[in-house]
Structure formats: structure tokens, C-alpha cells
Amino acid sequence: MPQYAVIIHSPAPADPAALTPDYLALLERYPAQVEELGGKEIAGFALEASTTATSVRGDVVTDGPFAEAKEVVAGFFVLEAPDLDVALAVAKLNPACLDGGVEVRPLFAWAPDGRA
């Protein structure tokens, strides 16, 4: 089954410690909703607040996220879904859509010989 990266964008600084009980309740219900739509969450990760980020560009190391933005990457998960339509339906139900957004990208599948 195809796999998709679901990238969560939230208002900066996207601190997971600041999530409200209501938002946490939505997150707890989300995996069941994913399965109802025919998807399966393979792995998921929340990122620490964007204020903890360190960026590297060549030899230059700076504090802060890679780009200044009102929204930052707050986390991601890998979704297994039969097709992009199901992946998008899953993404639309993600609580991050309430105040941020969700990006869905197919994971690149390498051929057994390591070629694209």
C-alpha cells in the first residue's frame, strides 16, 4: 500500500507543551478516524517548539528554524493509505487544520536495485 508523509504546520512556535485539553482530545480520536477511512498511521512524531531549532546552511549554524514564518513544521507522521484520495481525506480531519495546515506528500519508493 502506498505511504504518505503528512507534515503538520502550526502557528509559531508550535510548542506541544502548550496544547489545550480540547486539542489533545481531538488528537486522541484521530487514529480511529484514520482507520475508519482505510488508512493506517505507521509512525508519528511531534517536534519541540520552533524556538529550539538550529539551522545549518553550509558551514553556517544559526539558532532558529530554517525559515522565518508565521507557521512552522510542528510534526509529521507516515500514513499508509490505498491512494492519495484517502490520504487527503485523512489529512482534512487532522486537528492541525483548525489553526494551521497539513501537507501530504507521497513517499518516494526505491526500486529493489536502489534506483528510482
Image: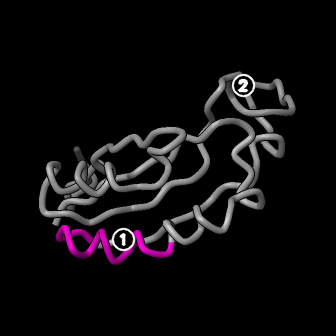
Q: Name the residue nearer the viewer: 65 or 72.
A: 72
Helix, strand or loop at mark 2: strand
Q: Name the residue nearer the viewer: 74 or 3.
A: 74
Q: Name the residue nearer the viewer: 55 or 99.
A: 99
Indicate whether 75 appears above or below 116: below
**How many discs mark residues in the rendered view?**
2
- Quadrant of the rendered image containing residue 16: bottom right
**Residue 57 — which label?**
2
> Which is nearer the N-term, disc 1 or disc 2?
1
Q: At x 71% / y 22%, what residue is drawn?
A: 68
Indicate whether 72 appears above or below 75: above
Mark 2 Cα-neighbour bin, 10 Å: few <14, some 14–19, many ≥20 = few
Magenta stretch contains residue 98? no
Q: Estimate the spatial distance between the alpha carbons at disc 1 and disc 2, rounded to whole Å.
A: 32 Å
Helix, strand or loop at mark 1: strand
- Start-end of magenta stretch: 28-39
Q: Amino acid at mark 1?
A: Glu
- Quadrant of the rendered image containing residue 58: top right
